[in-house]
């Protein structure tokens, strides 16, 4: 049975075999979709996204722009009157995980797809073996397929798009509050695989560290 699954001879068994290979390729790609992190409570998210900085709005806004540019973001909107900045970045490298909303015990779409593909694969393997054995009794059947399988699975790179929005509020005593919110999406072959907010502490720590460095350099020039 094992040899008939690996090297099927009948036309029907070969069709099932190559269809199974294509299905498994697509399934593996779907199961390997970027992992998603849980969205934290609102109070936790705001604490992670917000920092106060010494300096007036103009000075802190400049440091925000420099930090974004150091992270390879392109400024799209800049309104110094209301303290608003939006920036974006497109890359083939993952820079931050995207959060998902919902209950922790809910299955993700990728997990559901993996279970469904696994069940179909088992059925297809059994069917291919049965039909192969029955066809071998009636015909020797040559191998009509010359090579590997042709699958319709994704073959392009994953594209990560991130968007950052920064709100600055000038406080008393030359202090400015900075709040950063970020979101992103993952695309492959023109299809959106996932979208969500960015809630990884490392992402915000990197941005705020860049701001601190920029402010320090400005003060010591």
Image (cartoon, rainbow, N blue to C red):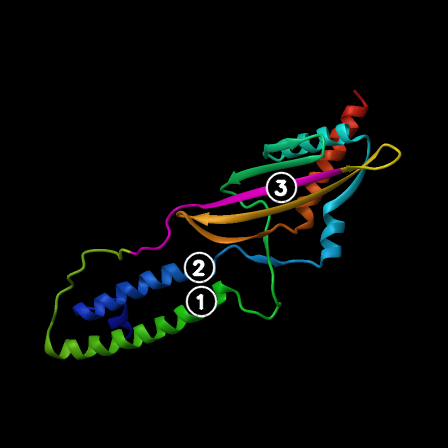
Is residue 164 covered in magenta? yes
**Residue that carries the numbered disc 1 in the rendered image:** 114
Kindly report the distance in space between the C-alpha atoms of the residues bearing marks 1 and 3.
Answer: 33 Å
Whether tag 1 and tag 3 are in contact, CB under 8 A, the answer is: no
Residue drawn at x 74%, y 51% as measured from the top left = 46
Instruction: From the viewer's perspective, tell me whether residue 138 is left or right of residue 18.
Output: left
Residue segment shown in magenta: 151-168
**Residue that carries the numbered disc 3 in the rendered image:** 164
Q: Disc 2 or 3, which lies upstream in sequence?
A: 2
Q: Disc 1 or 2, which lies upstream in sequence?
A: 2
Residue 31 vs residue 67, the one in the foreground = 67
Kindly report the distance in space between the C-alpha atoms of the residues bearing marks 1 and 2.
Answer: 7 Å
Whether tag 1 and tag 2 are in contact, CB under 8 A, the answer is: yes
Residue drawn at x 15%, y 76% as measured from the top left = 136
Q: Residues within 10 Å of mark 2 (few under 14, many from 20)?
A: some
For the stretch drawn in magenta, the main secondary structure is strand
**Residue lying furthest left:** 139
**Residue that carries the numbered disc 2 in the rendered image:** 30
Instruction: From the viewer's perspective, tell me whether residue 208 is left or right of residue 163.
Output: right
């Amino acid at each position: 049975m094992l040899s008939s699954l690996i090297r099927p001879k009948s036309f029907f068994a070969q069709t099932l075999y190559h269809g199974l290979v294509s299905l498994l390729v697509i399934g593996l790609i779907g199961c390997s979709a970027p992992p998603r992190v849980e969205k934290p409570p609102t109070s936790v998210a705001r604490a992670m996204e917000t920092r106060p900085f010494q300096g007036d709005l103009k000075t802190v806004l400049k440091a925000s722009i420099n930090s974004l540019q150091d992270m390879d973001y392109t400024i799209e909107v800049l309104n110094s009157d209301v303290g608003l900045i939006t920036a974006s970045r497109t890359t083939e490298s993952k820079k931050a995980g995207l959060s998902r909303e919902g209950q922790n015990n809910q299955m993700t779409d990728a997990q559901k797809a993996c279970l469904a593909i696994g069940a179909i694969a088992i059925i297809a393997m059994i069917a291919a073996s049965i039909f192969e054995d029955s066809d071998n009794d009636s015909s020797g059947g040559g191998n009509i397929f010359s090579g590997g399988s042709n699958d319709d699975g994704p073959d392009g790179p994953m594209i990560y798009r991130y968007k950052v929005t920064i709100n600055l509020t000038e406080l008393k005593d030359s202090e400015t509050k900075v709040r950063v919110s970020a979101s992103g999406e993952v695309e492959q072959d023109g299809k959106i695989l996932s979208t969500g907010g960015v809630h990884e502490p490392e992402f915000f720590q990197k941005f705020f560290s860049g701001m601190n460095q920029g402010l320090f350099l400005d003060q010591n020039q």
